[in-house]
Image (cartoon, helix red, strand yellow):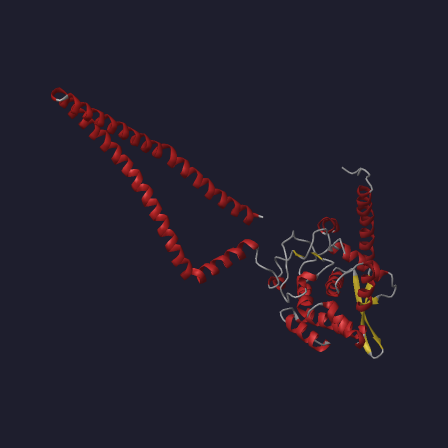
Amino acid sequence: MVFNTGAALLDAIVLAVVSREKEGTYGYKITQDVRKVIDISDSTLYPVLRRLQKDQCLMVYDLECAGRNRRYYKVTEQGLAQLGLYKEEWKRYSSNISMVFEGGINNES
Amino acid sequence: MNREQFIAQLARLLQDLPPAERQEAIRYYQEYFDDAGKENEDAVIQELGSPGKVAASIKANLQYGGSTFGANDADMENTGTESQTKDADGWQQNGQTMNRWNQSTQQGWQNSSTQSPYAMQARKPKRGVGGWALLIIILVFASPVLLGVGGGVLGIFIGILATVFALWISFFAVAIGMIGGGIAVLIKGILHAISSPAAGLVSMGGGLICIALGILCAVFFLWFTFQLCPRVLRTTLNFISRIVHKGKEARAE
């Protein structure tokens, strides 16, 4: 992996992955899905989830499943709004970089 | 290491967290192992790295929102509770997204939580302070050897200085002696020349030679004092100040 993933980008990816499931999803699955996108250590996911939860971007609920409790994470309204912001910013950011890689001139001064 | 040991060790490492936080974290990882399934237990442990690594990342992110996650956390692999952290600007937890974007391209682990009590034990001291402390410890332990060797070196150095000084003084003395003596012999020769010209001329000649040699010594002495010494002193001072400056630059980075 060449480029490090910053905290904000990681937040955005996690929000996007969780938002794909309407009813939310659980930690292990989130980790697996995120790792399909970027190569990241498993130990980094929990703090992100915890932080997003504290920031009110994610909510948690417990579901009894096969005799054990499982904690599910679900995106909140605020989380969706934040994700929207991240997506906008990503479009701008990645297009700027693509432009400079393809030899175009960045119009923003 | 098996799952129980991993979780137990993690719980131990998280003892300084508030109980609620610790319980949340432990619960998360217990469920994580459950969901992975017994067959993946070893793989999970390998992926997580070590209890120390997990604990450190939990603590590092607890107070402040901001940290940078290196995709390659290999440098964290064997360091237990230690984590390489550098100070970054403070990040508000409720997400100033623009700031995060701009700063998220920095490499490695960054811990902005100077205020985080939990992250304190995970931080290495700043390079300057740590370097100096280490240096002092080394000096203390090496002091017997250093004093012995240093004393010897110092002795040699002083010896050389003393020799140079003696030479310098002697040039002065020789110069004066030669000139004085030469004048004396010259005068004696002049007086002698009245009675015996040959002997007198010899004396005069000898006297003049002495004077010449004396002047030569005097010139050398003056050159030594006013040219050689200042230049040597200046070169030495430049050398020392360059070393000091290089040290300052290294520490200031």
Which residue is located at x 44 percent, y 61 percent?
B142
Q: Exactly how many numbered labels are in the figure?
A: 0
Q: Quadrant of the N terminus of chain A?
A: bottom right
Choose top left, top right, bottom left or bottom right for residue B5.
bottom right
x and y, in percent, of residue B53 in the image: 68, 66
Q: Is residue A54 left or right of residue B114?
A: right
In the displayed image of the protein, which residue is found farthest to the top? B194
x and y, in percent, of residue B15 in the image: 63, 71
Residue in the foreground of this view, choosing between B64 and B10: B10
x and y, in percent, of residue B33 in the image: 77, 73
Q: Is residue B145 above or below residue A92?
A: below
In the displayed image of the protein, which residue is found farthest to the front? B198
Q: Quadrant of the C terminus of chain A?
A: top right
Q: Is residue A17 above or below residue B161?
A: below
Which residue is located at x 59 percent, y 60 percent?
B124
In the displayed image of the protein, which residue is found farthest to the left? B195
Residue in the foreground of this view, choosing between A98 and B235: B235
Q: Is residue B50 left or right of residue B218?
A: right
Q: Is residue B186 above or below residue A76?
A: above
x and y, in percent, of residue B56 in the image: 66, 65
Q: Is residue B150 left or right of residue B90?
A: left
Residue in the foreground of this view, choosing between A95 and B24: A95
Which residue is located at x 72 percent, y 48 percent?
B102
